[in-house]
């Protein structure tokens, strides 16, 4: 275990499903009626954690993790998560560390909604009891994006 990792990444990041999106999201991101319901990816961050970082609701932020990932998403400041926890939905793809990859999609194949894939930021450990992979959580830091 690296020394100081918890200080560098003080927030527990978890990911999960949105009601508006089905499955992994590929079908939903390409369906104009469903894509309209959730148009960009976000991180839920507690008001206290946001305030400590100078983050306001709707700001772009960078979520960084021990894997070296730096994903750019909108901040959703909410009390639905505690001060030490953040949540990002796993349905999005098409961006890579802040860059929209639209140019790499074949003509007519790009999803309507694109965003960062949280799975690029999570870790690849496993539960030692169940031997189930753990790709839905990690530790992170969240900073206000400055261009």
Image: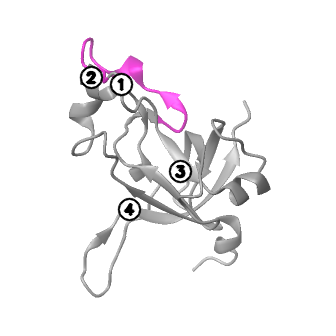
**Residue with the mark numbered 3:** 69
**Residue with the mark numbered 2:** 33
In the structure shown, which secondary structural element does the residue marked by tag 1 occupy? loop
The kind of secondary structure the magenta stretch mainly shows is loop
For the C terminus, the quadrant is top right
Alpha carbon of mark 4 to alpha carbon of mark 3: how far? Answer: 14 Å
4 and 3 marks in contact (CB < 8 Å): no
Q: Position of residue 113 (x, y in %)?
A: 37, 26
Give 23 or 129, whichever is nearer the viewer: 23
Give 130 or 43, whichever is nearer the viewer: 43
In the structure shown, which secondary structural element does the residue marked by tag 3 occupy? loop
Give 115 or 123, whichever is nearer the viewer: 115
**Residue with the mark numbered 1:** 36
Q: Position of residue 20 (x, y in %)?
A: 31, 39
Alpha carbon of mark 3 to alpha carbon of mark 1: how far? Answer: 28 Å
For label 1, the crowd category at 10 Å Cα-Cα, with few meaning under 14, some 14 to 19 and many 20 or more, is: some
4 and 2 marks in contact (CB < 8 Å): no
**Residue with the mark numbered 4:** 136
Colour logic: one colour
Q: In the figure, 54 relative to 94: above or below?
A: below
What residue do we see at 25% from left, 32% from top?
28
Q: Position of residue 40 (x, y in %)?
A: 46, 32
Q: Is residue 106 magenta?
A: yes
- Report the disc number at residue 133: none
- Start-end of magenta stretch: 96-111
Alpha carbon of mark 1 to alpha carbon of mark 2: how far? Answer: 5 Å
């Amino acid at each position: 275990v690296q020394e100081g990792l918890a200080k560098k990444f003080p927030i527990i990041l978890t990911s999960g499903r949105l009601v508006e999106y089905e499955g992994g999201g590929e079908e939903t991101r390409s369906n104009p009626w469903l894509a309209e319901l959730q148009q960009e990816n976000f991180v839920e961050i507690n008001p206290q954690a946001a305030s400590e970082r100078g983050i306001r609701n709707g700001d772009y932020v960078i979520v960084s993790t021990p894997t070296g990932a730096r994903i750019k998403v909108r901040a959703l400041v909410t009390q639905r998560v505690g001060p030490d926890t953040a949540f990002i939905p796993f349905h999005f793809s098409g961006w890579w560390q802040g860059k929209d990859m639209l140019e790499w999609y074949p003509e007519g194949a790009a999803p309507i909604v694109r965003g960062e894939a949280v799975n690029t930021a999570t870790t690849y450990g496993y539960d030692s009891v169940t031997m189930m992979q753990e790709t839905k959580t990690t530790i992170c830091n969240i900073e206000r994006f400055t261009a």
